[in-house]
Amino acid sequence: MPSSSGPDALPANKLRPAAGPGSAAKFASIGSPYFGILLAFMAVILILSNIGASKGVAIGPIITDAGFFLFPLAYILGDVISEVYGFKVARKAILTTFALSVFASLCYWVIIALPGFDDDFGAAKQTALEGALGPVPQIVLASLLAFLAGQTINSWILVRMKARSGEKSLWARLMGSSGAGEFVDTLIFCSIAASVIGITDFGTFVNYVVVGFVYKTLVEFALVPLTSLVIRWIKKREPSYGA
């Protein structure tokens, strides 16, 4: 006999609230086009940020990588998916994005391994490809492990907070889940990827971790009003939301 406790024992579009009647957490099904669009954007952003992350960037005393302006957007999309569709769907999106990033990395390896023209131009192109895409597999490993852990924690916290508050306190869910997810993500990613982009001493590594965490978290916090508007816009147009 199935247990009657926990979110999995309830209908797909509701979680048991802790805040009293009428405040149940609602979720939409994935039958409409919106989920597919969000998933496509999240996958493309992660793949592009993996390529950008292979280049170290120094802006004054700040040490980061060239994917810094893209990666927070993947987390914002993860927040939207978690809030609108729930943890199970968010987990599906995370794993799909993970698989597509692995596929992209395998394609880079094949592209580099294929024999090119042996003239000067062909040799220059080969060197450029190896320099740009060669480090990406290790960056992808770092990014995927970090993304998998960080996004899962981010989504789980957001959905658990929603189970307690229902539709209220969206801003608190977005900020609370983002801080935890970004910390785990940044620590894992930087620990694996630092050597690939040329970070070898401890002081620079600490700079890289702190700057990455603070920057990505502040970006997410600054964009909470926009994220909230997007979430509300999708909720209003999802036929199954709260049904």
Image (tube, rainbow, N blue to C red):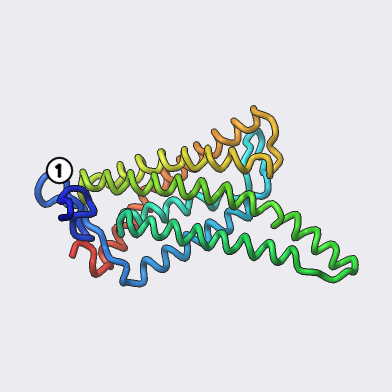
Q: Amino acid at mark 1?
A: Ala
Label 1 packing within 10 angstroms: few (<14), some (14-19), many (20+): few
Task: Spot the residue most to the front.
Answer: 1
Asked whether 98 or 205 is in front, the reply is 98
Quadrant of residue 116 in the image? bottom right
For the image, the number of numbered tags is: 1
Q: Nearer the viewer, residue 134 or 167?
A: 134
**Residue at the location (16% across, 43% down)?**
18
- The residue labelled by disc 1 is 19
Where disc 1 sits, the SS reads loop
- The furthest residue to the right: 119
Q: Would you place residue 181 above or below residue 24 in this image?
A: above
- Residue 151, given in percent of the width and then of the height, sits at 43, 49
Q: Position of residue 145 (x, y in %)?
A: 52, 47
62 or 56: nearer the viewer = 56
Q: Residue at x 54, y 39 (%)?
A: 212
Quarter placement of the N terminus: bottom left
Q: In the picture provided, is 1 more to the left or to the right than 54? A: left
For the C terminus, the image quarter is bottom left
In the picture, measured across the screen, residue 113 lies left or right of residue 79, that is right
Task: Give the residue at x 71% y 55%.
Answer: 134
Residue 155, image x and y in percent?
36, 49
Residue found farthest to the left: 21
Name the residue at 42% across, 42% down: 181
Q: Quadrant of residue 160?
A: top left
